Image (cartoon, grey):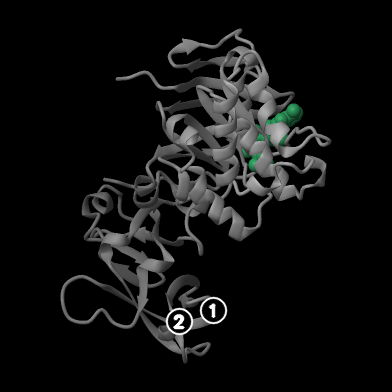
Amino acid sequence: MSTAAISLRGIHKTYGKNIALDGLDLDVGEGEFFCLLGPSGAGKTTTLKTVAGLEEPQSGTVSLDGTDMTGVEPYDRGVAMCFESYALYPHRSAYDNLASPLRSPRYKLPAAEARERIGEIAELLGIGALLERPVGALSNGQRQRVALGRVLVRPARAFLLDEPLSHLDAKLRQAMRAELKAIGAVRRTTTLYVTHDSVEALALGDRIGVIREGRIVQTGTREEIWHQPYDTFVARSFGRPRINLLPGTVTAHGTFLSADRFFEIPSAPAAVRSVAPGTPVQIGVRPRDLSLGSAGPGPGGIELMGTVYITEVLGRATEVTVRLGAQHLSLVVPRADAAGLRPDAPVRLTVRPESLLLFEADGADGEPGRRITG
Ligand SMILES: Nc1ncnc2c1ncn2[C@@H]1O[C@H](COP(=O)(O)OP(=O)(O)OP(=O)(O)O)[C@@H](O)[C@H]1O
């Protein structure tokens, strides 16, 4: 196996009584764009700072290209980090801010090459027209892009980016997401990118790592994370509206009982059979995998009867919340399909069995239930 560009093993980092990282393991491959996703306080920034050498863990090792970085100063690690709170020279022009790292003896590039690099990055970040302006006269979003540019102009063995698009409005953020990976330096350089936005992680990450309470819960491609989530925490972290999780029990016949309904789960028969009858479990189904109306002829669809609780228009689609016994199920359907639905009206829902996921029940302590694979 080739050596990972960034490798963290058993990292423990505490601040007083606060455990920030709790035995974290992470590998980022050479040239990979890796997104680290997790809620506030999960340990994302601490992970980046540990790689950069700005924080010293109590135990564990950080290696870059196979070399142990213990005792290596941040400046000598060869990584470039962009913080959410950015340090720029406010009185100097945006161009100067971008150019100053390239003037240091360490990176010194021939002037023409430096200009070309700055030009490419400024253009792609949409700040080409602002280069003469002092940074102090720029908006927060523009400043954030200069700060990001300042990191990306430098030749580095890895870029460490902490929520670099957080101050941009939704439209610009979407545009920048597309541009970011097109930047040559980003394409060629290993990038560890921190975000709490699952849409951003899915759009950008070659692979995604989901972090919770200082540990990586799962790493994988977007398909793996989406279709084979490790647990209900990962499943809930992706997709809006969120995945539906219906609590129930496995019956003696290897089916699943929830809200007085029996389900066969043909896509996961081994998973269901591996669970002792009476065990509390949860069925996961994503809102876009449910449709209105009956399954029609042909094999496959599981039908559920419920009543309309509420509908909410989301652009061209409508989110319909359906009451199913004591449970609520959310589905997203084309707007036309939901026209005429009134609260309390009976509706029939259909779901394809292969899109059902089976999980253990969540623990009483809030510990997420793991997916049952059989
Ligand atoms: N300097 C510090 N002193 C004390 N506690 C800290 C310090 N830095 C981080 N922590 C704690 O460590 C935990 C992880 O923090 P970290 O900043 O890595 O999370 P994060 O996932 O980046 O969160 P956010 O998305 O809010 O930035 C939190 O509980 C935080 O309060």
Within the image, what quadrant is residue 55 found in?
top right
Whether label 2 touches label 1, CB < 8 Å: yes
> In x, y percent, where is residue 43?
61, 34
- Answer with the quadrant where ligand 1 appears in the image: top right
The answer to whether residue 295 is above or below residue 166 is below
Q: Amino acid at mark 2?
A: Arg
> In x, y percent, where is residue 279?
37, 52
Looking at the image, which is closer to me, 203 or 93? 93
Label 2 Cα neighbours within 10 Å, binned few <14 / some 14-19 / many ≥20: some
Tag of residue 335 = 2
Residue under pointer 1:
313
Q: Is residue 329 left or right of residue 136?
A: left
Q: CA distance from mark 2 to mark 1?
A: 7 Å
Residue 295 seen in this snapshot: yes
Q: Amino acid at mark 1?
A: Val
**Total numbered labels:** 2
Query: Which type of secondary structure does the marked residue at label 2 adopt?
Result: helix
Q: Residue at x 25, y 65 (%)?
A: 264
Q: Is residue 26 left or right of residue 298?
A: right
Query: Which type of secondary structure does the marked residue at label 1 adopt?
Result: strand
> In x, y percent, where is residue 33?
45, 36
